[in-house]
Amino acid sequence: MKGNSSSAKPLTDHDHYKAPSEPSIKKVPPKRKKRRRSQAFQEAVTGYFFLAPALILLGVFLLYPMGAAFYYSFTDFYILKPDDISFIGFENFSYIWQDAQFRQAFWNTVYFSVIVVPVQLAVALGLALLINKKLKFRVFFRTAFFSPVVMSLVVVSILWTFMYNPNEGLINQLLGLIGISPQPFLTSPDQAMNSIIVMSVWQGAGFQMMIFLAGLQNIPNHLYEAADIDGASNWQKFLHVTLPGLKNIALFIFITISIAAFKLLVQPMIMTQGGPLGSTKSLVYHIYETGFNYRDVGYASAMAVVFTLIVLTITIIQRVLIREERG
Amino acid sequence: MKKLSLLLAGVLVVLMLAACSSDSNANSEGESGSSGENTTSDTVETGSVETSVEATGDEEVMLDFWIHQTGEDETNAYIELIDAFNKEHEDIHVNAEVIIDDGASAYSDSINAALVAGNLPDVMAVDGPYVSSFAEAGVIQPIDEYIDEETKSQYVDSIIQQGTYNDQLYSLGAMEASVMLYYNKDLLDEAGIEPADSIEEAWTWDELMENSKKMTTEDRYGLNLFMNYGVGEWLTFMGAPLAWSNGGALISEDGTTVDGYLNSPETIEALNYVKELFAEGVVTDSPGEMQFEEGNAALALGGPWIAVSAEDAGLNWGMMPYPYKDEKVSPSGSMAYAVTNNTENPEAAVELMKWMTNEEATIKISKATGMPPAQKSAFETMEKFNELPWSVMKEQVIQTAHARPSTPAYPVLTDAFAQSFHAAALGEDVESVVEQQVQRVERELKRFEE
């Protein structure tokens, strides 16, 4: 402290000594502020500079198209006549309610989602539990279950189309070995969507399995040990330790699968072209066909707007439900 | 590390194998178009293929030219023709761009994108029935003033018919297409059935039904309709003549309505005939890709490319004319060329079109693809068309070919018919399905009302 006071003196001396130039000293704080401001400005510039790639991409490929789709949904934009667009109000939207194909595509999509979401969730969890055990060839199984995720969905769809072939397909040949008569699969209006569901679950479950696996490994071991001491059975451990421990991850997966399921497009496009009799036409596929095959961009945009609203609603409902459960 | 790299290598192999099989699938789908794809392989480079003649700088006119790619031989034939054109015409230089036609929408997607961006080439290949929608939208322009009657009369009638919209000529094609009733000679002999060797002897619907039934056994179908091509243009191309032959139609003569045409009793009767074929079990809705070539179907209503694949498979085959009810008609129409409104040199563009579709060109392309030529004289020059079985195809192209309807609503109309045909094949109630489709097309037609 003494040192401090002694050093303070020369400072004040120094100040007095510099008294004539006091005004310039007073000017220092504003200068600092300016410096801070310009520094903040610079930082902001740097920040936006780093953000720019993301913002530009988002703007060009997401925000602008969304805005354009919203605008076109009120017009009669026909792809062959890009210079002749006129405003037609809500005509496109009112036709949605009369469009039998839209209704069919909507219910197809709902059916697909309602089945795929829980089944895929269960399969992914099952696979994760299996792989979490210290089995022989664990790495092999993990790779095997995960490999469909790495493959392009288009490739997978084409392969499964071969396997589903009613005459020469692998699956019917296997069924024949156990005495089941050949099934029409993709060529039957009753079986086509279910065939696509099976393939989609197989293709998608590997990814969710990995996320579940991470979740499983995050559950502290001492909880299981405690359960063991309490004499809990394996089933009780699963029910009261594993499941609660996975809850947040399951919710995350639930939402992502739901949204992905609603965007069903590639499988019907490659495997069935939406047939037979429109039984596998999904909403997104119907929108695509309307816009590109039938060139009716205006109506396709209107359906896209409605589709976005539907997905948005589902997401909000899920969020609310989840919040309630957490609360 | 070793394990990881082994794993990666394994994944790569799987992906490559998968990629190969996807290619072969794309090929088979390519055949489903009416546009007469003779898919041999996909090995031609996919990007833009510049023709080998370099621009020398003193040429006045540059033409951009889009051709669709379906097979290597076909593309090579085009490139040779374009090279020759560039050599012959010192004042015109053609840049050709080959665009993949996967039988689905790849080619039309390219056109749509270029259209919206205003980047269309000077000349482009378009599928015959789509000419009218491009014409109606003013995307392509009439060429009557650049072509004289004599040149026009050298083409088979159906090519002029498919290229005409509102009494103006818009497109010229090098090849025609057709659907023949192919037969397996051995199986016909076995059943003691006489094939029809000319249009006069063509089978009626009843004969087709009866003979198909006769030749259907437990491990073999009587008839193949190539339903494996999917629900698309093929069903309209192959199936619409059934309606026409019965006095039905897809759309009114003036193109303003389908009500009373697509759902006319005659069209519905034709679709019910299809339904009966499937109900009798003489034909399947999911044939293997080579069902006919492998002898698992006695008859097949297939495109000219089936002659090529049957020959390659070593089958003892023949062709008959398309079966009829009242009037003898047959499928027609293929890829053709049209001049876009984007061009500054319509005259040079038409010159190129004529070059690509003259007798020499049609013969060359016919040899490369197996498709019938679009010039009448080419049929005389090519000897194979003057003897069986190819003489039947020639007769059919010249005498009974019937172009698909010329309407700007064609994309929706063809899907409406294909869906109805497929519903009939699956045994659905034809009338109610057709009625639904009529509503759809009527809505689309409103767009083009004045």
Image (tube, coloured by chain):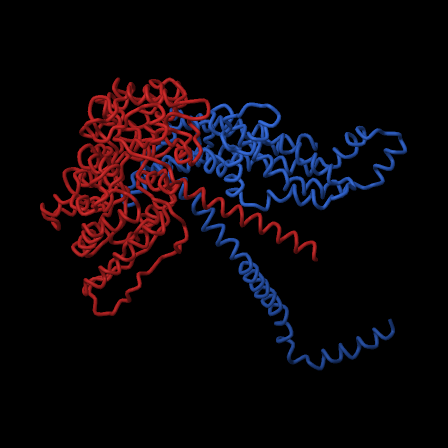
Query: Is A226 in front, or is A87?
Result: A226
Point 43% across, 45% down: residue: A65
Quarter holding residue B310: top left
Residue A249 % position (x, y) = 68, 39
Q: Colour of chain B?
A: red
Q: Which chain is blue?
A: A
Residue A315 visible to the viewer: no
- Residue displayed at 54% across by 56% down: A51
Please identify the residue farthest to the right as the structure is shown: A229
| Quadrant placement of the N terminus of chain B | bottom right
Q: Is residue A100 above or below residue B16?
A: above
- Residue A1 lies left or right of residue B279; in this view the side is right
Could you say where residue B324 lies in the image, as x and y percent from the top left?
24, 24
Residue lying at the far bottom of the rendered structure: A17
Looking at the rendering, in which quadrant would you find the C terminus of chain B? top left
Q: How many marks?
A: 0
Residue A81 is drawn in which quadrant?
Answer: top left
Q: Is A126 placed left or right of B200 in the picture?
A: right
**Residue A266, relative to residue B121: is it above or below?**
above
Q: Nearer the viewer, residue A37 or A82?
A: A82
State the image coordinates of residue A324 (x, y, percent, origin top left): 67, 30
How far across and how far down the image is residue B239, in percent?
30, 29
Q: Is residue A230 left or right of residue B7?
A: right
Say which quarter of the image contains residue A323.
Answer: top right
Query: Toward the viewer: B76 or A191?
Result: B76
Q: Residue at x 28, y 65 (%)?
A: B53
Look at the image and tell me whether residue B58 can be seen.
yes
Task: Give the camera-side residue of B410 and B364.
Answer: B364
